[in-house]
Amino acid sequence: MARLFHVPLSPFCRKVRLSLAEKKIEVELVEEKYWEQDPDFMRRNPAGKVPVLRLDGIMMSESAAICEYIEETRPEPSLMPTDTAAKLEVRRLVTWFDDKFHHEVTSNLLYERVNKKVMKQGYPDSKNVKAGAKAIKYHLDYMTWLLDHRRWLAGDAMTLADFAAAAHLSSLDYISDVDWNRSDIVKDWYAKIKSRPAFRSILADQVSGFPPPRHYNDLDF
């Protein structure tokens, strides 16, 4: 069985978990306090980051590389289109969420509210929290624009771009930091995503000291 070293609210780990689950790859989840830099974990990934996946006898790190490997070795059901230009758009949006959204929103909200406490690094910086709360509005509006023109974020079929976005938004939804009333079209898109069997383990996550809101695992919000 595959083994994934992860932390429950990491959007990068969640993206990998969603890819594995969508392709029905059984995986053992091992929660890893990567910030403690345990020597055994550092041998698995000298970068000292999660996710780290052991699959096919290979120890893999970096969520983008892991998802590419999963897609290439388990192509069905596909999370990437066959058209080259369409692949470009999927990769662009995955990078949008894992880079821009992460920097402007996730790190300012989730990391300030949760990670600092868990890692015993002090209290949230209110300036960062305000910046994240402001930035997420822009990103939700951009998603609304995309979904006004497409069935899914990158086109007519669900792709890894949708999982990347849902990974970040689900982590923030766990701490009630997504205003679903801002966009009905984004809310409907997320309802479709969270209703997929691949999302079940994500919705079952529990983080000590941080209970999720009632709507978190409600498929109808």
Image: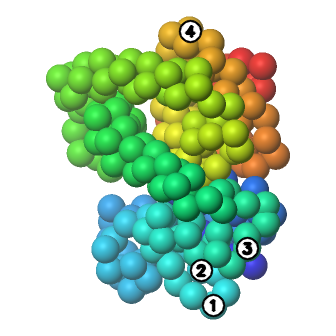
Q: Secondary structure at mark 4?
A: helix
* For marks 1 and 4 on the same chain, the one whose residue lies earlier in the sequence: 1
Label 4 crowd (10 A; few <14 / some 14-19 / many >=20): few
Label 1 crowding class (10 Å Cα cut-off): few <14, some 14-19, many 20+?
Answer: few
Q: Which mark is residue 181?
A: 4
What residue type is disc 2 on? Arg
Query: Residue at label 3?
Result: 74
What is the spatial separation of the Cα atoms under label 2 and label 3, in whole angstroms?
Answer: 15 Å
Asked if marks 1 and 3 touch (Cβ < 8 Å), the reply is: no
Examine the rendered structure and indicate whether residue 61 appears above or below residue 213: below
Query: Which residue occupies the foreground of this view, 43 or 144?
Result: 144
Residue type beneath disc 1? Gly
Residue hosting label 2: 54
Q: Are marks 2 and 4 in contact (CB under 8 Å)?
A: no
Residue with the mark numbered 1: 57
Q: Kindly identify the amino acid type of the residue bearing the numbered disc 4.
A: Asn
The crowd level at tag 3 (other Cα within 10 Å; few <14, some 14-19, many 20+) is some
Residue 214: percent from left, percent from top: 67, 20
| Residue that appears at 79% across and 41% down | 196
Instruction: Kindly tell me whether residue 122 is visible in this rendering.
Output: yes
Residue 146 percent coordinates (x, y): 52, 28
Q: Alpha carbon of mark 1 to alpha carbon of mark 4: how far?
A: 45 Å
Kind of residue at disc 3? Arg
Q: Nearer the viewer, mark 1 or mark 3?
A: 3
